[in-house]
Image: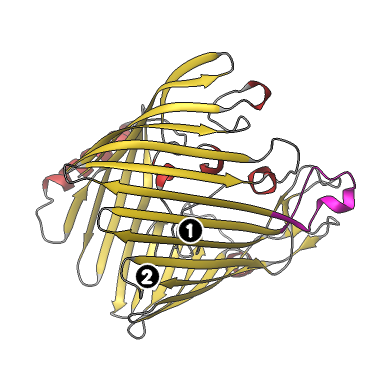
Amino acid sequence: MKKIISVLTGLALVAGAAMADGITFGSWGRGLWNVAANSGDDVVTDMHQSWGGDAPRTGISVSGSTENVGFAVDMFANGSGISLGDNALIWVKPIEQIKIVAGKKDQNELRGDAAFGLWNWDRIGAANGDVMVLEGWTFPDVFDGEGVAVVAYPIDGLTVGAGIRLSLEGTGATLENTYAHGANYAAAYAIDGIGTIKAAYMTKATAKDKDGKDKDYGVIAAAFDLTMVDGLYASVGAQIPTAHVFTTYDPLGLNLKDAPTVVNAYARYSLDALAVHLAVGTKLNTFDTNKDKREDRFDGNLGFAIGAGADYSLDNGIGFFGDVRYANGIYMANTSADKSDCLTLGLGVEKNFSNGKIGIAFEGATNGKGRYTYEDNAFAWEIPVKVEYFF
């Protein structure tokens, strides 16, 4: 506790000097109050986060930079707990074209997101963060995590770099494990007036094939972001493992977690006060624990998900959203069993202020895929009130 108080005191002192050259201070927070939701035979109420954690999130973020050196640090208060946030890093540019970042990093460079609708409310059903993972939907966070990122910008539009996972506590790792099983290598090129091409190779820890034998593998990622049409952003990306492997394995094929081929797409079109969204995701050659024969469980199955949404803003700060998604059972939970798929919907309204918002929504998910406990895979419903701020 003394360490946390010391850190917060230090952040407060930095915040007091926020007008100094190169230092910025900010804060963001959100909380969801479920005023009513079904759970079994009861109607319940609680407070939580969009991603399910303790609420509300309040945070302090401080960053500073000059031409060649910078830092960023976050502290989060989630409910009654205080912890280090997403960033605790130092970056240095030894020359203009190279940037070295060391520490805990969540900078999202090159990441291809598709965050809309229920992602900003309560992520239940097909909107759950373990199902349609809309951050990094078309291209992953290749440079982030704990360790070091070395990124070069040799010419205008070109980015080349590596994200290297390292222990921040002085624990040694072999060079093979570090660079062949714990690093990501990526490149991107922005074509002026057209879009951005991205490619990466992500090394992975050794996993198992369907016969239980150790298998070295990596994942090839590629994406293209189209920006040449006014009002339209469109992105398509794929992640292709060099072998179909299982990171969680048992000989019967009943307790598995695999690395399937993933192909995702997202499009957003904005016209005046209206924005519409479409996200499509697939998992190819994945497994199905519901198959009768062991040999049929491991591969050859298709998971798919689709989501569509719309946002509409009025001049007085009032905004509406609608969101509907569907994922089959293979995509939801790698099973073709009855009632394993999910249709999810959400509809809500927000009042926006200069530094925050308040809103209320209705959300529902079929087959018991809500936040609480449901008998006989009942329809899950809830009415969340969202409070959010940003400074």
User: Which residue occupies the foreground of this view, 135 or 153?
Assistant: 135
Secondary structure under tag 1 reads loop
The magenta-colored residue range is 285-302
- Tag 1 residue: 136
Give me the C-alpha separation between circle 2 and circle 1.
Answer: 22 Å
Q: Look at 36% across and 52% down and name the residue there.
A: 87
Q: Position of residue 334 (x, y in %)?
A: 71, 46
Dot 1: within a 10 Å radius of its alpha carbon, few (fewer than 14), some, or many (20 or more) residues?
A: some
- Percent of width and height locating residue 350: 28, 37
Q: Is residue 119 magenta?
A: no
Q: Is residue 289 magenta?
A: yes
Does the CB distance between marks 2 and 1 fall below 8 Å?
Answer: no
Which quarter of the figure has residue 349? top left
Badge 2: few (under 14), some or many (20 or more) residues near its Cα, within 10 Å?
A: some
What's under tag 2, amino acid-wise? Answer: Ile
Choose the circle earlier in sequence order: 2 or 1: 2
Residue at 9% across / 53% down in the picture?
19
Q: Determine if residue 105 is in view.
A: no
Is 138 displayed left or right of 90 in the figure? Answer: right
